Image: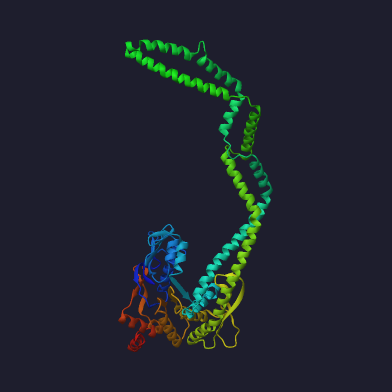
Amino acid sequence: MLKEIHIQNYALIDQLDLPLDSGLTMITGETGAGKSILLGALGLVTGKRADLSAIRDTSTKCVVEAHFDITKLGLKPFFESEDLDYQDISIIRREILPSGKSRSFINDTPVTLATVGEIGGNLIDIHSQHQTLQLATDQFQMDTLNAFVNQQTSTAKRPGSFIIKEYQSKLKEYRTQVKSLKDFKENQVALAKELDYNTFLLNELEEAQIDGLNQEELERENEQLSNVEVITEALGSLEHKLSADADGVIDELREIKAKLKAVESFSPAYQALHVRLTSVIVELEDMAVETERQKDQVEVDPQRLEVVDATLGMLDNLYRKHQMDNVQDLIHLRDNLADKVLSAQNIDSKIKKMETLIAVSMKELDVFAKELHGLRQDYKKAMESQILETVTLLGMPDAQFIIELQPSGSYNDYGKDEVLFTFTANRGSQLLALDKAASGGELSRLMLAIKELLSRCKQLPTIIFDEIDTGVSGSIAEKMAVIMKSMSQTMQVITITHLPQIAAAGDDHVIVRKKNDGDRTVSTIEKLNQNSRIEEIAQMLSGGSISDAARENARILLQ
């Protein structure tokens, strides 16, 4: 419900802080006093486009801020999806800057106008004789019938709300399957075009046997095999110098070592030299053994050299062909190609499997849709009867209202039904769709009847009736007031009216006045107490100077 509205620098309003209560609130005032200004301001906090001309003082910003109690509206998922802080009392604020730029906030967090519009539809519902087009929309008519069926079957073993939930869960799965099938078929065409080429590339990479290839090792081996003579000569020279019988370095050093051994006792320094030389000889002996081993392993192998050369050449060709520079990338490419080829080969089976799953889902959906259709058929006459009962009270005794259920060729969000409300206010006239069936006044009364029924079926947002009583007689106005009063037991109802019979039914009464303040005209909005309500309703009754009789009549209406 709307708990409070703050308006600053908007149209004829300088500054306004208006608290509102639950139940039925009446708004009255002279024509042109500014009642539409209040609706315009509320439109801003429900997502309507801002108009720079609405700023009273163009040197400062315009602010409209509304506080809503959203405890019962189930909006936590919306706040979570928009990454907004949820608060039971949430604040929506719109600011229009002198530059014309508009800013929007929900609980002090900046949001887009689209976000404000999305939540605004769940907070305030404004109706007038000129705003009844919603009645004719397929979605509104389906939602209304569903709400009635859900309420009527709430205690049943399988209530309508449960069946709709199960149906929508299966519908979500079905739509995912349909999308997957579409993707598979699109992929089938693309994969078929690429299959031959990908298979050729894959076979080439598989034949290359690139797993385990190490390019660095191959290049080293290639260097060795290509330089066998140079390597053999170098190792042979080293081996000869180290181990030759006559003049080998090791033998010569052994002789020197023996001489140092003879003098090491003469000085610690000689002893240290002896130790160091001994270590050098051991290292050289080890080098001699390793040199001999390495020389023995060197062999001329032209066949292996040819294989290594060919492998390196193959890798070089593959690198250039695929614009890569290492074996791991080639292996990754090969594996991807294998996946693509396999997918292309398996796509037909995937399509057949998905088509089977879709057929199963359709059978399950058809069961739910048939059950929902049956419930709607069972309860639509009761809904027609209740709406006609209210419409009759509102001065259309000859009205006819029929709900038509037409089969749909596809699944919608609520089954396979298309709902069409048909109506005529006159005896003997043809029943027509609502956008062709009635005048604005007749449709506004039908809307009131439908909203009254909905208020008994589900939690509705704050509803504002903007002079829907225009052209209504006194007795009908009294019945309208009774209906609005009944609705206000479960929701907040705000009514802008010119009729005293309706104004007297309110729990609260707000008056809009226009006055001159120097060279300016300003609108003010204030709540009335009991005495001022009597005066206002007496004024509405008399239309001129207030008589005692008018006051007494006003007191009677307020009882």
**Residue 282: percent from the left, percent from the top?**
44, 20
**Residue 302: percent from the left, percent from the top?**
65, 27
In the rendered image, is residue 130 in sight?
Answer: no
Vertical placement of 515 versus 286: above or below? Answer: below
In the rendered image, is residue 16 in sight?
Answer: yes
- In the image shown, does 118 or 224 lie closer to the viewer? 224
Q: Quadrant of the N terminus?
A: bottom left
Image point (58%, 44%), residue name: 332
**Residue 285: percent from the left, percent from the top?**
47, 19
Image point (52%, 68%), residue name: 169
Vertical placement of 53 versus 452: above or below? Answer: above
Image point (36%, 78%), residue name: 509
Q: Quadrant of the C terminus?
A: bottom left
- In the image shown, does 483 or 441 lie closer to the viewer? 483
Vertical placement of 519 versus 186: above or below? Answer: below
Image point (51%, 79%), residue name: 149
- In the image shown, does 123 or 373 lie closer to the viewer? 373
Q: Is residue 378 left or right of residue 260?
A: right
